[in-house]
């Protein structure tokens, strides 16, 4: 799907008629997240909360983060941030089940406390817990998938729960049509494709150091393909002694990747920089950006690199890169997981300053196509639709569609609450 097509997707959602009375009376929303770190879901929630707070919404952000956990993204004073103090942990199978019940119970209480008119949840397991927490309640819940559901495994039990609970959601949001098409119609009775906004972080003056920097950003996990990037860089390191590789991010594969860099003789040429002190800080000294992911939900770091005018290369994985890069116009795409092809395109950029300049110059306009204001317009219309549907049901004296088994649901949740004390 092209950038123009994505602009049409945003505009079609944002251009729908505003909800009749729901928006003019009471606008209160809760966003539910697993944590408050530097991830993509946390970023979009921060942007939504920030702009809707400016527009007069009462916003709450509910997270399973530890009670004293700082947020990587700063929220305005008007946004209530609720930490449930139940962060993910390595547990045995029985303990995981108990922990999930506790999270659902505590989330239910937090939602009751925040009293939102609409709930928006992000990421699969959190979506499922939000839907469990909403059993027996009339508050509409919108769930949002943020990755590639074909490739990202959440395990048998979570997949089973998703298939049974997603039909109870008011609707489903994904960032690409490809991701949406992965879900059967029953799991997306209402659906919206809303890409992420693209933030522009300024690089300042063009890098002039003798040492050049290839940059990659992401959680240090198998999905991000940093092992493939190390192989590609190893094939070029001897030919380009002035170039180094910096990988930003944290994750469970850091030690494995450091060992791999050492085995490839790259210890002096590769730096694992951790998380940047501030959002987008990694763009400042970047001469080339590479996204080596095996799969994606969108590609936030790639989008930010393009917006900053950094010449960029990406595996053409599902989903996101092809929506952001127009081949040889604003960036370079290579076949997924093809290390040799990646090395060839990296060589092209490393040896050609004019190509880097041209691609970087063309890339900057991506931020205009996916501005925060336009994307949040689309989110606001979706949330308004949920409020309007709830108001219409109340006028007709009808019960929410999820209330068909409300009495049983409420009894089930009351049992869990009692059991969890």
Image (spheres, grey):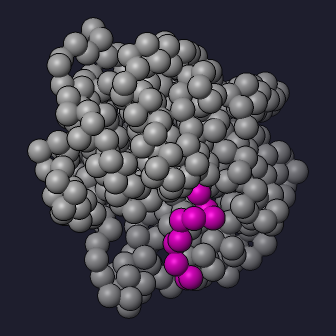
Q: Nearer the viewer, residue 354 or 331?
A: 354
Q: Residue at x 78, y 52 (%)?
A: 190
Q: Main secondary structure of the magenta part?
A: loop
Q: Quick check: 105 above or below 29?
A: below
* Front residue (pair 85, 284): 284
The residue positioned 11% from the left and 44% from the top of the image is 268
Q: Is residue 153 magenta?
A: yes
Which quadrant is the N terminus positioned in?
Answer: top right
Q: Position of residue 412 (x, y in %)?
A: 58, 82
Magenta segment boundaries in residue numbering: 147-157
| Residue 51 magenta | no
Left or right: where does residue 350 sit relative to residue 48?
left
- Residue 315 percent coordinates (x, y): 52, 46
* Quarter holding residue 189: bottom right
Q: Is residue 150 left or right of residue 419?
A: right
Where does residue 293 sit, x and y in percent of width and height? 47, 51
Q: Residue at x 53, y 71 (%)?
A: 153
Residue 297 versus residue 24 in the image, above or below: below
Viewer-proximal residue, 324 or 43?
324
Residue at the far top in the pictured view: 205
Q: Position of residue 205 (x, y in %)?
A: 27, 8
Q: Residue furthest front?
A: 239
Asked if residue 105 is positioned above or below residue 307 in the image, the reply reads below
């Amino acid at each position: 799907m092209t950038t123009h097509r994505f602009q049409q997707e945003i505009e079609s959602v944002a251009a729908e008629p505003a909800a009749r009375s729901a928006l003019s009376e009471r606008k209160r929303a809760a966003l539910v997240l697993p944590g408050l770190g530097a991830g993509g879901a946390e970023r979009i929630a921060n942007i939504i909360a920030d702009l809707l707070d400016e527009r007069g919404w009462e916003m709450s952000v509910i997270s399973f983060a530890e009670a004293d956990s700082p947020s990587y993204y700063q929220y305005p004073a008007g946004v209530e941030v609720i930490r449930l103090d139940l962060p993910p942990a390595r547990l045995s199978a029985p303990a995981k089940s108990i922990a999930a019940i506790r999270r659902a119970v505590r989330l239910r209480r937090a939602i009751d406390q925040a009293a939102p008119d609409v709930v928006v949840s992000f990421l699969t397991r959190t979506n499922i817990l939000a839907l469990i927490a909403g059993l027996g309640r009339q508050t509409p819940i919108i769930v949002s998938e943020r990755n590639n559901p074909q490739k990202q495994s959440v395990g048998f039990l979570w997949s089973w729960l998703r298939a049974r609970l997603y039909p109870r959601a008011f609707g489903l949001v994904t960032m690409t049509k490809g991701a949406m098409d992965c879900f059967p119609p029953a799991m997306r009775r209402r659906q919206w494709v809303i890409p992420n906004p693209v933030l522009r972080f300024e690089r300042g003056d063009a890098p002039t150091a003798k040492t050049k920097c290839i940059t990659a950003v992401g959680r240090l996990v198998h999905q991000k393909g940093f092992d493939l990037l190390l192989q590609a860089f190893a094939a070029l390191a001897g030919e380009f002694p002035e170039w180094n590789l910096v990988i930003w991010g944290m994750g469970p594969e850091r030690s494995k990747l450091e060992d791999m860099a050492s085995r490839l003789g790259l210890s002096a040429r590769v730096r694992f920089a951790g998380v940047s002190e501030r959002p987008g800080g990694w763009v400042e000294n970047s001469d080339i950006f590479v996204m080596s992911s095996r799969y994606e939900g969108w590609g936030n770091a790639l989008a930010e690199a393009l917006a900053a005018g950094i010449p960029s290369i990406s595996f053409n994985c599902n989903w996101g890169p092809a929506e952001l890069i127009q081949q040889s116009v604003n960036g370079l795409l290579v076949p997924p997981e093809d290390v040799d092809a990646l090395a060839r395109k990296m060589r092209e950029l490393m040896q050609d300053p004019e190509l880097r300049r041209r691609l970087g110059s063309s890339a900057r306009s991506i931020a205009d196509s996916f501005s925060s204001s336009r994307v949040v317009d689309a989110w606001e219309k979706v949330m308004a639709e949920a409020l309007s549907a709830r108001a219409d049901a109340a006028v007709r004296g009808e019960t929410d569609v999820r209330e068909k088994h409300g009495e049983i649901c409420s009894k089930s949740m009351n049992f869990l609450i009692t059991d969890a004390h």
